[in-house]
Image: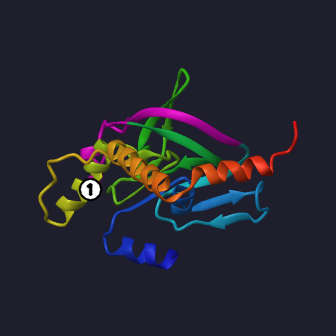
Amino acid sequence: MAHGVLQAHRQGVPVAGICGGYQMLGDTIIDEVESGLGTLPGLGLLNTVTHFAQDKTTTQVEGQMASALPGWLAAASGLAVRGYEIHMGETTLNAQCQPAMTLRKGENAIADGAVTDDGLVFGTYLHGLFDSDAFTRALVNGLRVRKGLTPLDHAFHYAQYKSQQFDLLADAMRQHIDIEKIYTIMQQHQEPV
């Protein structure tokens, strides 16, 4: 897979990574905590170094994309974002990279992610980023423009679509599962209180 990502990047294809994908896009991963493998090379597409930490970060966050993102990311500049982090690493940016966004953690504004100066590579610890219709549309349109296609003007409402899909799943389960039979089986195998 690494070969394919690197080959695509050499051909000018934009590359994005979230969480572990973000860490792997960097120059170096230093893991003296989880695997004991020590220092490992990353893909070298982001000029970053990740140090694995003892404590896992698990938090819901909101923030804003950087105000002047380059290239295919430009339409996402300044957009509000939200999601969650769940990782054990801290990533440091070096030259030729800028933070991709700023996240609010309590009273603090923390830089997160990295984007190359040409905008072809970006990464972040923020899961759920693509749940934002505005963010996803901005990136899709950035890719469309790169390919010489016109941007989409309509919005796809992911939250609404997801809710509809859960309703369809619930309907299918009600139609095809004998829930009373399941309750009977559960009662037969219930431990006495």
Along the line of sight, the residue nearer the viewer: 104 or 157: 157
- Percent across and percent down for residue 56 are 69, 43
**Front residue (pair 175, 14):** 175
Q: Is residue 123 visible?
A: no
Extreme top residue here? 107
Residue shown at 32%/57% (left/top)? 118
* Residue drawn at 48 percent across, 40 percent down: 83
Image quarter where the C terminus lies is top right
Residue 24 quadrant: bottom right
Say if residue 92 shows up in the picture.
yes
Specify whether residue 76 is painted magenta. Answer: yes
Residue nearest the viewer, comparing 188 with 84: 188
Quick check: 102 above or below 107?
below
Q: Is residue 57 above or below residue 145?
A: above
Three-letter amino acid code at the position of disc 1: Val
Magenta stretch encompasses residue 62: yes
Which span is picked out in magenta? 56-80
Q: Nearer the viewer, residue 119 or 187?
A: 187
Instruction: Say left or right for 178 vs 64.
Output: right
Give the crowd class for mark 1: few <14, some 14-19, many >=20 residues within 10 Å.
some
Residue 88 x, y percent position in the rendering: 67, 48
Residue receiving disc 1: 140
Q: Is residue 42 above or below residue 188?
A: below
Residue at position x 35%, y 47% in the image: 164
Image-quadrant location for residue 64: top left
Q: Is residue 86 left or right of residue 100?
A: right
